[in-house]
Every structure is written in C-alpha cells, then in structure tokens.
Image (cartoon, grey):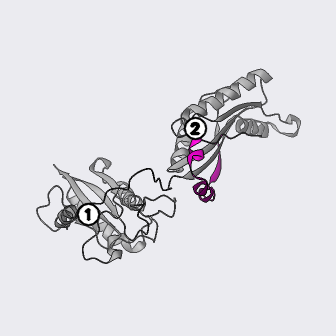
Amino acid sequence: MKKLLTLVLLLTLSMSFAQAELTKVKTDKYSVYFDFDKHKLTDIEDQKLKDYVASLGDIVILSIGLEGFCDDRGSIEYNRLLSQRRAKTVEDILEEIASKQKNVEGKGKIDLRITELNADELDATRTLNRRVDIYLEYFHNDYIDLSKPKDSLPTKVELVNRQLRLKTFQDKPLKVGDIIKLKDLYFEGGRAVLLRKSEKQLEKLLKELQDNPNFKFEIQGHVCCIDTDYFRDAVDEDTGINNLSESRAKAIYKYLLANGIPEERMTFKGYGRDFPLEGEKERNNKRVEIAITSIN
C-alpha cells in the first residue's frame, strides 16, 4: 500500500478552507519508462515527463508517491537497487515542483508467467515493466491567499494616460507606448478559445505585423465583471485558474507564432480588470490589445 505524504501547506489552511478545497482535489498517475538495465531516462522520456508536469499548470502538490520497477531478469537484490535508483532519478526531476517530502520506493522486479507468453509478448511486457509510476494528489493554485494584499488598482492618471495612447494601425506615425485597439475578436465565454468569426481580425492583425517588422510589442489581455475583490482576473474555465486575460493574450501569441511572427518580437501579459475603457459597455472590456514596446 502506498503511503502518500501530505505537504505542510495543506495543514496550515483553515478547516473551512480545506473542506471547500477538497472538492477540487485531483489525483493522477503517470509512468516513465527506462531502457534495459538503465536507471537514467532517455532524452525522449525525460522530455515527456517535463511536458507532463507542464501540462498540469499552476498546481499545489498535496502528496506524491514514486514506485520503481524492473523486469524479471537479474537477482532480487540487484533489481531492488536498480528500481530504487530509477525512482530516485524521477524524484530528482520532480524536485522543482514538489516538496522533498515524498514517498519513494523501489519495488524490484515484476514476475512474469513466461510459459504463457510468446517471444514478442514477453519482450513487450518486459519493456513496460521497466518503469517508475508517479502518483500525484493536487489542486489548482487558484485559492484566495488572504495573507497577501490585493494588487493595487491603477490611478486615475494612469487610466487617462492609457486612454490617450489608444491608437489604430492607421494612426501615423506610431510610437513606443502606443496601444493598438483590436476589434472583432471573439472568445467563447470563460475560455481562451477564439470563435470562427474572429478570423478576419486575426488575418488583418497578422498582415499589419508583417508590414511593420520594425517594432516589437506586448499582447495585452483584459477582462471585466469580476464579482470578488480578491481576484484581479477572471477564471479560465479550462484550467480553473484566475488568469483568463493572460490565457487569451497567450492564445493570440500562439496564433501569431504559428503564422510566422518571430517570438523575439513579442511577449504577452494579462492585465485582468485593471484598465477598463472609459464610457464603454462592459462587454467591450473583454478585449486584447497590442502595445508597442520598441521600434528599430
């Protein structure tokens, strides 16, 4: 039976908060595989593991367990040590995302009924048995931390100055600090998924950036209508994290990158509800803009 150690972080939360968050706790299992008689991952398996960790997003690890295994060849003691070394390899890779408090076990070999398998089945099964199983228990890091002050809201002067910097690509000459308003970009509610009717605006944006290769820019995401004062950004329904404005800015970044705009020309950032448009309807504050950061 696996013994999963609970991080100290969970114990510091109040009981009411812990009970509310338990409904969001998720568990996951992932396996990484090793070559015969090796305890170091191949480059391919190492990258797969890192991609898996990245796919989890912004999470809080509650507990983590690692179990290493070998195939049925070799002595009992040799296989036990090899399986432990394999588990230790994975533990070292995971150090960046979790506490050192983990349950790490080397289980040794997995026995096979060799007489029931043909040569191909035996080889394939042994390959799958040379592995480490990772057991995660976590929740997404979208809780309210009352120990930290809220982000300071922009001053009236900052809001006015920002309104004055709003331009279009037709305004000439454009200069550093100008912010390009993008119209007719449509996202699915609560998500960073662009709707088909945004295609014309995306194509127009792409052409303008191709025609103006001399400036670098920041893609800025904005939202509105957030009920609580403790979050400056809306929830991305696909991840459960309060970074919807950033997710939408990133969606535009990925579109431009996929269509040939060099990554060194652009960055992206979410500004939540910090910069509402004066006199505009709330729905118009759900927007993405382009801010010119430098001109060569």
Using the image, determine if residue 278 lies above or below residue 269: below
In this rendered view, identify the residue nearer to me: 41 or 243.
Answer: 243
Image quadrant in which you'd find residue 136:
top right
Proximity of marks 2 and 1: CB atoms separated by less than 8 Å: no
Q: In the displayed structure, would residue 37 be above or below residue 209?
A: above
Confirm whether residue 41 shows in the render: no
296 left or right, relative to 204:
left
Evaluate whether residue 114 shows in this view.
yes
Which residues make up the magenta segment? 1-30
Q: In the rendering, at what x and y percent does residue 145 appear?
A: 47, 53
Measuring from the top left, give residue 189's x and y in whole percent: 45, 71
Viewer-side label of 2, 1: 2
Q: Residue at x 14, y 57 (%)?
A: 175
Residue labelled with disc 1: 207
- List x then y, in percent, for residue 221: 34, 62
- Report the residue at 63% width, 53% height from top: 26
Classify mark 1: helix, strand or loop.
Answer: helix
The magenta stretch spans residue 16: yes
- Is 137 located above or below residue 175 in the figure? above
Dot 2 amino acid type = Glu
Return the x and y of residue 30 as percentages of the image width and height.
64, 45
Residue at the spot 43% in from the left edge and 69% down from the top edge: 227
Q: Earlier in the sequence, mark 2 or mark 1?
A: 2
Circle 2 — which element?
Answer: helix
Residue with the most extreme right position: 115
The reply, left or right, for residue 57 in relation to residue 107 is left
Please name the residue that numbered disc 2 is placed on: 45
